[in-house]
Image (spheres, helix red, strand yellow):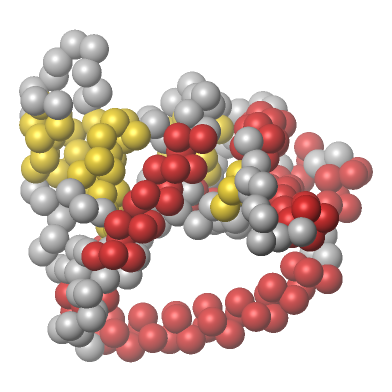
Amino acid sequence: MGQYFYACGTNGIPSEIEIQGNVFVLEKILKHDFFAGTSLYTAREYQANRPRKLILKQNRRQHFFGIPLVWLGHMLRNHELEILHRLRSLKQVPHPITEYGQTGFVYEYIEGHTLDESQELPEHFFDNLSDLLNQIHRQSVVYLDMNKRGNIIVGADEEPYMIDFQISLTFDPNPWLFTSLKKNIQQVLKDADIYHLFKHKRKLAPETLRPEEKTISRPNPLIELHRCLANPYRSIRRKTLEFLKKQGLVHSDNISEHH
């Protein structure tokens, strides 16, 4: 029964994949939850001018107690690819190489470690991260997942990278929304991205926080409202996962956060 709680089922992560004529072997499952499985692969044989490591992200394809959900995984995959295509001019986001199956896609692994794992940050890291976020916002994209430090990568080149655009949104002209309303919604969501960025800075590099950033990093009424709504969900989710672990239906290895 445990397979129903994972996007690919309990045995749905391939041990090897062939991409553009090169075979890649599974090195590690980075994250596997209800909506997606993300795995790291290493080339079996090194080839010059070819990637040595790839990430395969497979969105939901396992049915849930008989309810087909491939359509959901297909929709999530296409949505994220659309976002990444819009951001293709930016170096510091994933660049898809190819689609994989009905719900997956592959991109080159970003060398580095997550902000969660970082013990010492490069100078001006948060200034550069702020610039990256501003560039994303200028493409009419709001990220919406800035609260997760596991989605922010400190690259081997000491530059910030952002991954996992699954729940990000675009704000193109929409005849079903009044322009002023759309702009207001977009600005509220942008502000939430910026708030979480400076909250991370306040936590990890407080000595570099500027006076205006201190103000931005404090919760506003909308953030407090979000907490009131989100905290009960997190509590229920945590207790549910603990119960499922005790029953042997889910395993800690499959719900870890990484890129």
Residue 16 occupies which quadrant of the picture? top left
Q: Is residue 173 above or below residue 182?
A: above
Q: Is residue 15 visible?
A: yes
**Image mark count:** 0
Residue 74 occupies which quadrant of the picture? bottom left
Q: Residue at x 38, y 86 (%)?
A: 240
Residue furthest to the top: 48
Q: Is residue 175 above or below residue 96?
A: below
Residue furthest to the right: 211
How far across and how far down the image is residue 143, in percent?
A: 59, 49
Q: Residue at x 23, y 81 (%)?
A: 67
How far across and how far down the image is residue 9, in percent?
A: 17, 68
Q: Is residue 3 above or below residue 97?
A: below
Of the pair 237 and 142, the residue shown nearer to us: 142
Q: Does residue 256 appear left or right of residue 149 in this picture?
A: left
Q: Residue at x 20, y 84 (%)?
A: 65
How far across and how far down the image is residue 196, in percent?
A: 68, 54
Q: Residue at x 54, y 52 (%)?
A: 168
How far across and how far down the image is residue 42, in percent?
A: 18, 33
Residue 124 occupies which quadrant of the picture? top right
Of the pair 158 and 240, the residue shown nearer to us: 240
Quarter of the figure with the N terminus: bottom left
Q: Does residue 84 appear left or right of residue 146 in this picture?
A: left
Q: Does residue 212 appear left or right of residue 104 in this picture?
A: right
Q: Is residue 196 visible?
A: no
